[in-house]
Amino acid sequence: MSTRERIIEAADQLFYEQGFEHTSFAQIAQAVGISRGNFYYHFRTKDDILDTVINHRLQRTNVMLEHWEVEGETPSDRIRSFINILIMNRAKIKRFGCPVGTLCSELIKLDHPAQGDAKELFILFRTWLSRQFVQLGHAEKADELAMHLLAQSQGIATLASAFQDEAFINREVDRLHDWLTSCTATP
Amino acid sequence: MSTRERIIEAADQLFYEQGFEHTSFAQIAQAVGISRGNFYYHFRTKDDILDTVINHRLQRTNVMLEHWEVEGETPSDRIRSFINILIMNRAKIKRFGCPVGTLCSELIKLDHPAQGDAKELFILFRTWLSRQFVQLGHAEKADELAMHLLAQSQGIATLASAFQDEAFINREVDRLHDWLTSCTATP
């Protein structure tokens, strides 16, 4: 990875683990192991890094959604890929919540200019899920179901981190799979 | 209100609206309209204020839960009081999310010593809801149902603030009421 890529990766992780506001230039530089001078060569302000981190996440999310699209045979399979990220990422979620939800919440409170860009991360999932629900035969309620599922995953992440409870994640994921089965049964 | 109480109210509101980390002594002093000297007479550090704000919220939450307990005839009525705070506070939730969830998430990321105290706010709701589900005839699954409902309310608050969407809150609250009706029907 180039120095620039390493800065983006380190900033992404630190913004997630300890928040955007709380993370300093010095901490990112230290995590990458470069001087402040070298750092400033790549990024002038923390807002510059934030923009780049959000774009980086958008790209990564797009790749993931395209992968699920290709990999899942049915729309139901594909929605299950979304549900299962709660299991895949449970160790991190249990400690720091959802990277999208917590970043959006923080930027809203800071009234930060990048809050609209961060929201695009939610919009990617919302649009993608909505398309799956259309294919599942729920054209009229597709967006409503997408938002419902997104909300559930957010709530699970928030409580899992507050209570550091992995069993809770597993239980709620089972509920989501049952819910999806009931959606599939009644198109 | 005494100066001390006014400081607590102002800090509570600012921590909610713009986050704990982002709120300065100077901003709280300005909101109350007192000098920094007068301020320091009441609170030495921001952590002192945070402790007091959390205790204040715990007391207020306890009063609210006792009120619901007395007011609601059936456990189902009482759980509906909980669900309806999403409607009662929708204007604020749409802008800043849930005061409990966002404070807990922020303190976890800061690895702040008060994160355990903030979690007590969730525990109050969890314990109270759990007791209602026991009375509803779900003794074995009472805590699971309480956590499920808490998670849903958290997810609704997170997405409502990300999308500034009041219609979404109303729709999800209707879903929660339907869900509770189905819980009441199958004890």
Image (tube, coloured by chain):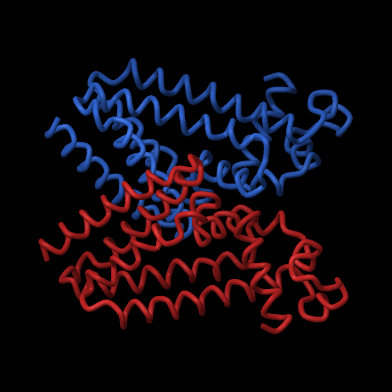
Chain colours: A red, B blue
The answer to whether B42 is drawn above or below residue B144 in the figure is above
The residue located at (54%, 67%) in the rendering is A118
Which of the pair A94/A40 is nearer the observer? A94
Classify residue A47 by image quadrant: bottom right
Picture coordinates of residue B23 (x, y %)?
72, 45
Which of the pair A124/B36 is nearer the observer? A124
Picture coordinates of residue A63 (x, y %)?
44, 80
Which of the pair A95/B183 is nearer the observer? A95
The answer to whether B53 is drawn above or below residue B26 in the figure is above
The residue located at (45%, 27%) in the rendering is B124
Classify residue A102 by image quadrant: bottom right
The answer to whether A118 is drawn above or below residue B11 in the figure is below
Q: Is residue B168 left or right of residue A133?
A: right
The residue located at (57%, 77%) in the rendering is A55
| Quadrant occupied by the N terminus of chain B | top right
| Quadrant occupied by the C terminus of chain B | top left
How many circles with numbers are drawn on the protein?
0
Q: Is residue B118 left or right of residue B160?
A: right
Picture coordinates of residue A160 (x, y %)?
45, 46
* Extreme residue toward the top, this view: B70
Which of the pair B97/A13 is nearer the observer? A13
The residue located at (62%, 72%) in the rendering is A53
Picture coordinates of residue B20 (x, y %)?
67, 43
Classify residue B135 by image quadrant: top left
The answer to whether A157 is drawn above or below residue A39 in the figure is above
